[in-house]
Every structure is written in C-alpha cells, then in structure tokens.
Image (cartoon, rainbow, N blue to C red):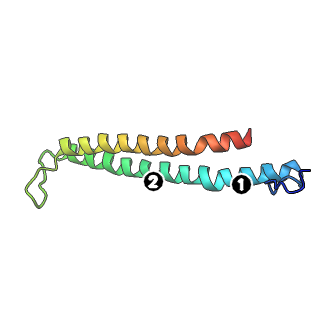
Amino acid sequence: DGKDIQHCKSIFGSVPLWHRQAYITYAATVLFLIPLIIIAVTYARILKKISDKVKEGKSSKRATFNKKGKSTGTGTLSKAKIKTLKMTIVIILTFFICGAPYFIIEMW
C-alpha cells in the first residue's frame, strides 16, 4: 500500500522558494566566490612580487648568487615568473571548473 516507503525531502520543501534561493546565493558566495577572489588576489600579488624582482634584476647588470653558488639572475627569475604564471592559471581554473558547475545548476 506504500505506507512503509521512506522519502527523502529537502528542508526547503515546505518553505517559500526565496528561502532556497537565498541559501544557494549565500553558499555560492561563501564557498565559491570569496575563496576564488582570495586565490586570485593572492596569486596576483605573488606574480607582482616576481615581476618586481625581474625588473630589479634587469636594472642591476650583475647577477647575484645563492648559497649553493648558483646564479639567480634575470633568466632564472623570468623562468620562475613563467612557471608561477602557469601554475596560477591552472590552480584558479581548476578551482573554478570544479566548483562552478554545482552553483550554476543550483542557481538555474
């Protein structure tokens, strides 16, 4: 007769639609948009710092050496800048690609 069947329901089933919309908007902001902005700003600052080091290295014609005797001239910093830029793009895109579909579908 169907009386023993259990149904899973959302907590939003008995409340107005705007409650669910407000919850999804809040969750998307706190769990996705704010971390995405923090990650992007943090990596932008890292890239800026590396860029400043490259400019600083180009202004001084001599190369500096680290404790192991390896040169840390502009070529090394340019490589670090390119590698950091690539890693930044991959990290931000991965975060976006993994998180965006859920919130896009939920908001739709």
Q: Which residue is mark 1?
A: 26
- Which of discs 2 and 1 lies nearer the camera? The answer is 1
Quadrant where the C terminus sits is top right
Answer with left or right where residue 1 lies relative to residue 31: right
Circle 1: element type: helix
Disc 2 is placed on an element classified as: helix
- Residue drawn at x 19%, y 44% is 76
Query: Which three-letter amino acid code belongs to the residue tagged 2?
Result: Thr
Q: Residue at x 42, y 41 (%)?
A: 90
Write the residue at 58% across / 45% down.
99
Q: Residue furthest right?
A: 1
- 68 in relation to 83, above or below: below
Name of the residue lying farthest toward the bottom: 67
Q: Which mark is residue 7?
A: none
Residue 47, percent across and down?
A: 37, 47
Is residue 43 found left or right of 83 in the rendered image? right
Mark 1 packing: few (<14 Cα in 10 Å), some, or many (20+)? few
Q: Which disc, if any, is residue 42? A: 2
Residue at image location 86% in from the left, 48% down from the top: 17
Percent x, y of residue 51: 32, 45
Q: Is residue 44 left or right of residue 104?
A: left
Tag 2 near tag 1, CB within 8 Å:
no
Q: Residue furthest left?
A: 69
Q: Of 88 and 59, which appears nearest the observer?
A: 88
The amino acid marked with disc number 1 is Tyr
Looking at marks 2 and 1 on the same chain, the residue that comes earlier in the sequence is marked by: 1
Q: Quadrant of residue 84?
A: top left
Residue 88 appears at what percent x and percent y? 40, 44
